[in-house]
Amino acid sequence: MSRKLRVIPFLFLPLASCADESTEPNFEYMPDMVSSAAVESFSASAVTADGRAMMAPPPGTVPRGYEPVHYGPGPEEAARAGRELANPIPDVDAARRRGEIAFRRWCSPCHGPEGLGDGLVARKFPRPPSLVADHARGLPDGQIFHVMTFGQGVMPSYAQQVLAEDRWKIVRHLRQMQAAAVALLPRPAAPAATPAPAPVAPAALNDKGAAR
């Protein structure tokens, strides 16, 4: 590069630094989109096809990091999810610990810390069923995930509050709670042994071989 070309950039420095800030703004070099007009999200717009400033995403698009659940609400769909869905989260300590944190944060206010249905909210609303009872232990993982996703009865959907991955981890923690509850159940007593019958002495025979 020649010496003249190296000097040219320094000629523009006075234009950017010597303007009178009290009367006029400084000069901007290549402002790009910094000074573009700001539009409120829900305001009207004369540029878009539907007249709204906040445009809807194209049909069929999925947000980054979102995992769609191809089921609808209702008991029949919940049962179908129980038949078709398997827990994708490995049954490891880290998953169960994260599930415990999410359970205490989102589930224990109604279901209680041990899943017995004795949470603080249950004092003002109908008490939910125990999550460690026979019925809950018999529910498939996919059905429990569906209930957390879409809600059931008076329980609302938690799809917006709890990530899908954390919902599966809650199921892992729930299974651990259920196993601990079963271990505390009293074991049925073993049946009493039936005494063996006393041996019967053989009958004496006469000289003709008949019993006397």
Image (cartoon, rainbow, N blue to C red):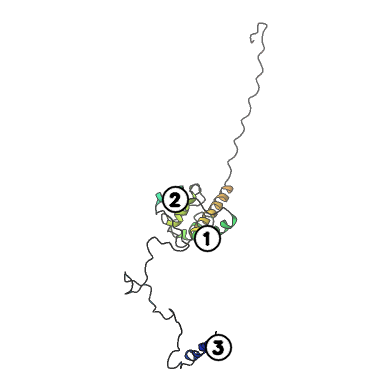
Q: Quadrant of the C terminus?
A: top right
Marks 3/1: CA distance?
A: 66 Å
Marks 2/1: CA distance?
A: 22 Å
Extreme residue toward the top, this view: 208
For label 2, the SS is helix
Q: Which residue is mark 3?
A: 3
Marks 3/2: CA distance?
A: 74 Å
Q: Amino acid at mark 3?
A: Arg
**Which is in the foreground here, disc 2 or disc 1?**
2
For label 3, the SS is helix
Q: Which residue is mark 1?
A: 102
Name the residue rendered at 45%, 54% in the picture: 147
Q: Nearer the viewer, residue 60 or 183?
A: 60
Extreme residue toward the front, this view: 2
Q: Quadrant of residue 125?
A: bottom left
Q: Nearer the viewer, residue 96 or 22?
A: 22
Q: Which residue is mark 2?
A: 81
Q: Amino acid at mark 2?
A: Ala
Check the image and report above or below for 211 versus 103: above
Q: Residues within 10 Å of mark 3 (few under 14, many from 20)?
A: few
Q: Nearer the viewer, residue 182 or 163?
A: 163
Determine whether label 3 and label 1 are within 8 Å by CB.
no
Q: Residue 84 location, x and y as percent?
A: 46, 48
Q: Quadrant of residue 152?
A: bottom left
> Is 210 on the left-hand or right-hand side of 113?
right
